[in-house]
Image (spheres, helix red, strand yellow):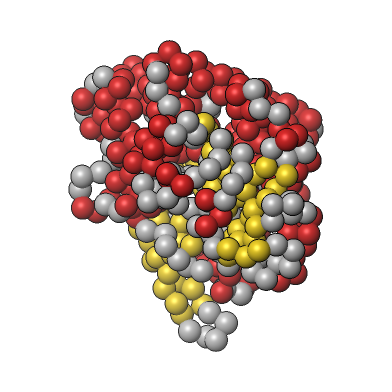
């Protein structure tokens, strides 16, 4: 994204990854030029009445990267660091993710620069409703379907759905996914991303001939994705030796009880001070000795600076964009098997797709149907990426990007340029 408006460390990184894939694919130059930038972006002011009576103006974004395969799809992030460049990078990654796993959806992302933990429920609701009103003509079940991301959840999606529906004059459940089941959400969406990460770790372990029952794992970021991943890995007999959140981390070579971590977090809001283990920082956790490392926090955590010190065999990216291209090269040299973000965390958007389909058909599935279909799609994608990486002698990230970008490029060439 050469133009100054899009520029940020995350967007430069997303474009760098894309350029590597485009070169390997010998991608049509005209197509490549279009894909380096989003289709469109909207920046909105979100005036919000705070509890003390003041009106605070937040800045919100919605970036739509590419919709050649179908309506735009992607989460809404509430975090102090949200900016146009970050949201653009995340939107681009959504395009490759949806394409890689074969969904008829394009890539988008949205967000508001705010700290949701410092907002009251009332403030959060007001901000969400006004943001929705500001982007109203950009979204819709046939246009662009938001979902949860970092800092947002099913309640936030319920407010988005309600605001949109109030404006339309009737209930439109298909405008967002990740809603509560009571208002048209699907069973299994909340756990979908973490569950998908675990399915991909299982595939990787099988491919590498590793017995998961003898493995240790560390999770950076005990949010929705990290917590589900830790819980489901523990259920498979994996020993969780490290975990962290924004407040810091905890390490215990004897293993941490995920149930206790969850209870402690629920009670205190943070992991800091968790009694049974040694405390360390959220970046130190990446360097502890473990078989499986799961970065499930934010972008660019694994860089040229710390990549050589990683001691894991499998790196399963629960977060979007946690590893920089320089770090990728080092990990590949050190024999770390990377399950790239657009594959590892695709479970979330896959079940979002299921939710959208169910809403459009007004016909709902069982949890078993959701789980089995999710597993089928992800395992097939894993095998496709693995074959591509073996055939082209490239790492798993490049293999995944090649498949994701190629499908989008083909569709663009079929559809042609409207002028
Ligand atoms: N925010 C999630 C992601 O980064 C899910 C997006 C969705 O479900 O649309 O993949």
**Which residue lies at the image location 66% right of the left edge and 27% below the top edge?**
210
Residue 157 visible from this viewpoint:
no
| Horizontal and vertical percent position of residue 390 | 46, 16
**Which residue lies at the image location 42% right of the left edge and 44% below the top edge?**
308
Q: Is residue 294 shown above or below 314?
A: below
| Horizontal and vertical percent position of residue 232 | 73, 41
Q: How many labels does the image show?
A: 0
Asked whether 39 or 308 is in front, the reply is 308
Residue 197 visible from this viewpoint:
yes
**Which residue lies at the image location 56% right of the left edge and 19% below the top edge?**
383
| Horizontal and vertical percent position of residue 11 | 33, 47
Q: In this view, does 72 lie to the left or right of 296?
A: left
In which quadrant will I find the N terminus? top left
**Which residue lies at the image location 26% right of the left edge and 19% below the top edge?**
26
Q: In this view, does 237 lie to the left or right of 218?
A: right
- Can you name the residue that lies furthest to the top here? 391
Q: Is residue 210 shown above or below 291?
A: above
Q: In which quarter of the image is residue 174?
A: top right
In which quadrant will I find the C terminus? top left
Q: Quadrant of residue 248?
A: bottom right
| Horizontal and vertical percent position of residue 92 | 39, 40
- Can you name the residue that lies furthest to the bottom here? 52
């Amino acid at each position: 994204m050469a133009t100054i408006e899009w520029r940020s460390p995350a967007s430069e990184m997303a474009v760098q990854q894309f350029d590597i894939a485009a070169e390997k694919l010998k991608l049509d130059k005209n197509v490549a030029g279009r894909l380096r930038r989003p289709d469109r972006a909207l920046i909105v002011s979100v005036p919000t009445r705070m509890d003390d009576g003041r009106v605070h103006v937040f800045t919100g974004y919605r970036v739509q990267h590419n919709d050649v395969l179908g309506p735009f799809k992607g989460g809404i992030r509430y975090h102090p660091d949200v900016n146009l460049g970050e949201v653009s990078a995340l939107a681009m990654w959504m395009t490759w993710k949806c394409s890689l796993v074969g969904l008829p959806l394009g890539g988008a992302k949205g967000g508001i620069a705010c700290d949701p933990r410092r907002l009251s429920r009332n403030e959060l609701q007001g901000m969400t409703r006004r943001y929705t009103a500001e982007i109203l003509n950009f979204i819709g079940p046939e246009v662009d379907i938001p979902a949860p991301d970092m800092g947002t959840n099913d309640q936030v999606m319920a407010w988005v759905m309600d605001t949109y529906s109030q404006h339309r004059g009737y209930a439109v459940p298909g405008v967002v996914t990740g809603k509560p089941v009571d208002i048209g959400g699907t069973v299994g969406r909340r756990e979908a991303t973490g569950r998908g990460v675990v399915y991909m770790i299982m595939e990787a372990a099988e491919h590498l001939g590793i017995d998961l029952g003898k493995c240790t794992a560390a999770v950076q970021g005990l949010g929705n994705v990290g917590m589900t991943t830790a819980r489901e890995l523990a259920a498979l007999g994996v020993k969780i030796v490290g975990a962290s959140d924004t407040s810091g981390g905890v390490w215990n070579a004897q293993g941490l009880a995920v149930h206790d971590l969850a209870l402690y977090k629920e009670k205190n809001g943070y992991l800091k001070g968790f009694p049974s283990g040694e405390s360390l920082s959220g970046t130190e956790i990446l360097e502890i000795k473990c078989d499986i490392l799961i970065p499930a926090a934010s972008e660019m955590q694994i860089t040229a600076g710390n990549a050589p010190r990683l001691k894991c065999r499998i790196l399963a990216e629960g977060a979007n964009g946690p590893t920089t291209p320089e770090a990728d090269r080092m990990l590949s040299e050190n024999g770390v098997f990377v399950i790239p973000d657009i594959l590892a965390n695709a479970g979330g958007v896959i079940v979002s797709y299921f939710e959208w389909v169910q809403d459009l058909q007004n016909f709902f599935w069982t949890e078993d149907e959701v789980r089995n279909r999710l597993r089928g799609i992800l395992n097939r994608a894993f095998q496709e990426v693995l074959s591509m990486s073996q055939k082209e002698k490239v790492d798993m990230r490049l293999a995944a990007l090649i498949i994701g970008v190629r499908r989008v490029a083909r569709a663009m060439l079929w559809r042609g340029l409207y002028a």
